[in-house]
Image (spheres, rainbow, N blue to C red):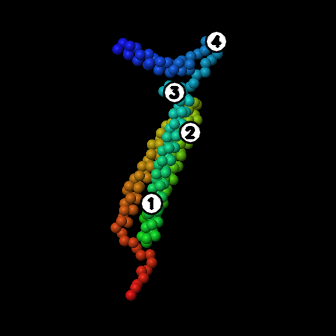
Amino acid sequence: MRKLIINLITASVLALTPAVAMVQAVSTVPATTGSTAVTAPSTASGHTCTDMQNRIAARINNWQTIKDSKVDRWQKMHDRFVDVYNKLKAKGYDVTKLQNDAVTLQGYIDAMKKDYDDVIAKANEAKAIACGDRDVFRATMQDLRNLIKGTAKPQWQQIRDFVKKTLKPDFLSYKNITQSPTVAPSVSQ
């Protein structure tokens, strides 16, 4: 049992050694007099600016992936909706309500693309100034949070609500409607 405890302690100390060495390398001042040590600037939470830039870059990749998947999903749904709309129109149904819904949905999709592009642009701006003035960086990050909460997330929620509350009921209303004649029926005797 004692040997197991010693092995666990040794393993944990060895695991911490590289991290301790890295912290010491960044924070130690050279012994020579008259020289100044260059240490990486840190943020309020103790991360270096390159760590912050890497974290922001990872978030940018995440937002780009989210944007691509959402736009792809909604665009495919819009395309399928337009296909069904065209089939109903070819069969002689009055599809003006669906036509307006298709235009509105495409407008929402385009707005969502623009909002996510704005978020990504603001994140790239924050990434560029992560090593600069701390107050400017904080203000930019707050603007980014407001942009996400204020426009990007509500935009895709608005699309979901539009599809659930408007598009789907309008589409299902055609289930029980008979087609309107587009050409005069031929009378046979």
Asked whether the residues under the numbered discs 3 and 2 touch, taking CB atoms below 8 Å apart as contact, a structural biologist would say no
Q: Which mark is residue 124?
A: 2
Secondary structure category for the residue under label 3: loop
| 73 versus 40 height, above or below | below
Type of residue at label 3? His
Lower position in the chain sequence, tag 4 or tag 2 = 4
The disc label shown at residue 81, or none: 1
Mark 1 vs mark 2, CA separation in Å: 35 Å
Q: Secondary structure at mark 2?
A: helix
- Residue 27's tag is none
Question: Which quadrant of the structure image shows residue 13?
Answer: top left
* Amino acid marked by disc 1: Phe
The numbered disc on residue 33 is 4
Going by the picture, which residue comes out furthest to the bottom? Answer: 189
Foreground label between 1 and 4: 1
Q: Are marks 1 and 2 in contact (CB under 8 Å)?
A: no
Mark 4: few, some, or many residues within 10 Å (few <14, many ≥20)? few
Is 31 left or right of 176, judged from the image as shown? Answer: right
The picture quadrant where one finds residue 89 is bottom left
36 displayed left or right of 184:
right
- Marks 4 and 2 in Cβ contact (< 8 Å): no
Mark 2: amino acid:
Asn
Q: Residue at x 36, y 69 (%)?
A: 177
Q: Mark 4: which secondary structure?
A: loop
Ranked by sequence position, the earlier of labels 1 and 2 is 1
Which percent across, then down, holds residue 149? 45, 43
Q: Quadrant of residue 165?
A: bottom left
Q: Residues within 10 Å of mark 3 (few under 14, many from 20)?
A: few
Quick one: 4 or 141, which is closer to the camera? Answer: 4
CA gap between label 1 and label 4 equals: 74 Å
Q: To which residue does mark 3 refer?
A: 47
Q: Position of residue 181 (x, y in %)?
A: 42, 75
